[in-house]
């Protein structure tokens, strides 16, 4: 299996990279600053590129079975880069001959009741709202797109944190998943497991799913 991973230097991106390499995948990590990725592996190729400049990465992703995008607006402080990046992938992946896209989404647009989303909770942190709204816009773009891209938008649980890899998780749709105690959580390693399993199972095509314990 060969994947191209955007955002490998981020928290979630690093977890996805580690899981992919542990499975023996060939990984092309497309990063803006190669010096921030210090990991070395015979299966890892690091390419300097910017999502917003497709010419910098189109050739690098050719031949990949899937592209994985784990992109945050926090580093550059521009939430609108999130839906903009979604549009770039939808427009350009077909040019590289890549049909499969896995998108690390947000939990803010998940429903906690009919018509009520996580972001609607009065306790939802104000600091998180701009990116949550931007991620919701990206989801709308995917759903409206006619591009020849089999995308999967994967929302994490409400709480995603460092922890152990159990390999266990549940898959849901547009509703927030909670456990028997009403808690919605998953670890970064198990989120990575769930995401890469979607590539191997070739399921959840053109759907938003969520994963949690």
Image (spheres, grey):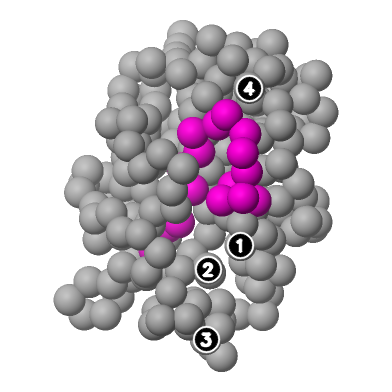
Camera-nearest residue between 9 and 7? 7
Q: Secondary structure at mark 1?
A: helix
Eye-nearest disc, 2 or 4: 4
Crowdedness near tag 2: few (<14), some (14–19) or many (≥20) residues, C-alpha within 10 Å = many
Q: Position of residue 46 (x, y in %)?
A: 62, 18
**First in sequence: mark 1 or mark 3?**
3
**First in sequence: mark 1 or mark 4?**
4
Q: Is residue 145 magenta?
A: yes
The CA distance from mark 2 to mark 1 is 6 Å
Q: Position of residue 156 (x, y in %)?
A: 42, 57
Q: Secondary structure at mark 3?
A: loop
Q: Which mark is residue 109?
A: 2
CB within 8 Å, label 1 to label 3: no
The CA distance from mark 2 to mark 4 is 27 Å
User: Is any part of residue 30 visible from this angle?
Assistant: yes
**First in sequence: mark 3 or mark 4?**
4
Q: Is residue 1 magenta?
A: no
Q: Which residues are magenta?
A: 141-157
Camera-nearest residue between 102 and 46? 102
Q: Is residue 128 above or below residue 212?
A: below
Q: Which residue is mark 4?
A: 94
Q: Which residue is mark 1?
A: 136
Q: Is residue 137 above or below residue 165?
A: below
Crowdedness near tag 4: few (<14), some (14–19) or many (≥20) residues, C-alpha within 10 Å = some
Q: Which mark is residue 121?
A: 3
CB within 8 Å, label 1 to label 4: no
The CA distance from mark 3 to mark 4 is 38 Å
Q: Residue furthest bottom?
A: 122
Q: Position of residue 110 (x, y in %)?
A: 46, 69
Q: Secondary structure at mark 4?
A: helix
Q: Secondary structure at mark 2?
A: loop
């Amino acid at each position: 299996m060969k994947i191209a991973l955007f955002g490998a230097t981020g928290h979630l991106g690093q977890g996805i990279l580690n899981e992919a390499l542990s499975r023996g995948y060939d990984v092309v990590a497309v990063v803006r600053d190669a010096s921030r990725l210090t990991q070395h592996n015979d299966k890892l190729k690091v390419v300097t590129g910017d999502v917003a400049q497709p010419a910098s990465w189109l050739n690098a992703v050719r031949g990949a079975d899937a592209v994985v995008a784990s992109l945050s607006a926090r580093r550059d402080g521009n939430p609108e880069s999130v839906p903009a990046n979604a549009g770039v992938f939808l427009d350009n992946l077909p040019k590289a001959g890549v049909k499969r896209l896995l998108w690390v989404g947000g939990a803010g647009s998940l429903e906690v009741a009919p018509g009520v989303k996580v972001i609607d909770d009065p306790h939802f942190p104000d600091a998180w709202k701009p990116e949550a709204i931007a991620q919701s816009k990206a989801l709308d773009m995917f759903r409206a797109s006619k591009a020849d891209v089999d995308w999967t938008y994967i929302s994490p649980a409400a709480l995603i944190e460092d922890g152990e890899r159990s390999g266990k998780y549940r898959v849901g749709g547009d509703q927030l998943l909670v456990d028997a105690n009403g808690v919605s959580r998953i670890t970064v390693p198990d989120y990575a497991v769930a995401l890469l399993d979607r590539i191997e199972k070739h399921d959840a095509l053109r759907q938003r799913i969520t994963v949690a314990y």
